[in-house]
Image: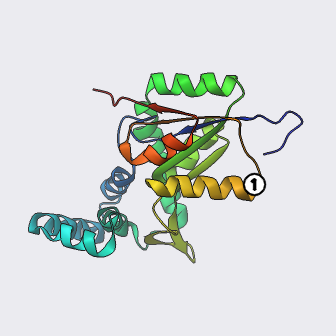
Amino acid sequence: MTSDKPTNKLALFDFCDTLVSFQTADRFVHFVRAQERSLKMYAKESLRKIIIRSGALRFFTRLAGTDFHKKLVLWQLKGMSNSHLDRLAECYYRTEIKPALIKESMETLFLLMAQGYKIFLISAGYDAYLKYFAREYQIDKLICTEISFKNGKCQGTFVGEDCYGQRKLVQLKEHLNKAGVSFEETISFSDCISDLPLLQWSKTGVVVRKEG
């Protein structure tokens, strides 16, 4: 993050319901299941629905943490190859996410970029597809929930913790400290109260109203 003319301005953007008009993480798994038509994935999805209908989700959430349901959905991807999931992630980005980008929010992103702001995307969405957005729109840094792989196979779990709520601010600070950089001007955009720590950390916090 060094250049002949380093910027001292940073803009932070949440993704789901801020830059795109829906929640992307679980929907990615549902997209993959629909594409694959895998009996194993359908069986895991049926189990998820049984857990929800039985009322057991609340118990497991207390036991395993607030992201249990998200983990339960992601578990459906276990065993898929990295290369195959990557192709599906790109397809998901092109066909589902890109058409649903919120025009006004994207215009704000472009304006800040033109004004010399570094643009960071901080999301609880998955790296598998967010990297395509970051690459296409030249995002300076992507901080998000990462899907775990071992020996080229999806583990159906996160790498570390879900990048959600307070964890977003923790990971941002870890990155800034590691890079040895700081910014005089900081502005953040999010639709969600869970991002209050990030909004309060920034000099300017902007609450984005959900579409509709």
Q: Is residue 144 left or right of residue 72?
A: right
- Which quarter of the image is occupied by the C terminus? top left
178 vs 43: above or below:
above
**Do we see residue 27 in this rendering?**
yes
| Foreground pick, 15 / 29 | 15
Q: Is residue 111 left or right of residue 92?
A: right
**Occupied quadrant, residue 6:** top right
Residue 146 location (% of width, % of height): 52, 61
Return the residue nearer the eye: 124 or 59.
59
Residue at image point 71% right, 56% down? 177
The reply, left or right, for residue 144 in relation to residue 115 is left
Above/below status of 32 relative to 98: below
Would residue 88 be visible to someone looking at this image? no
Q: Which residue is mark 1?
A: 179
* Residue 55 placement, left or right of 181: left
| Farthest right residue in view | 4
Check disc 1: other Cα within 10 Å, few if <14, some if 14-19, many if 20+: few
Q: Amino acid at mark 1?
A: Ala
Residue located at (78% from left, 45% from top):
1
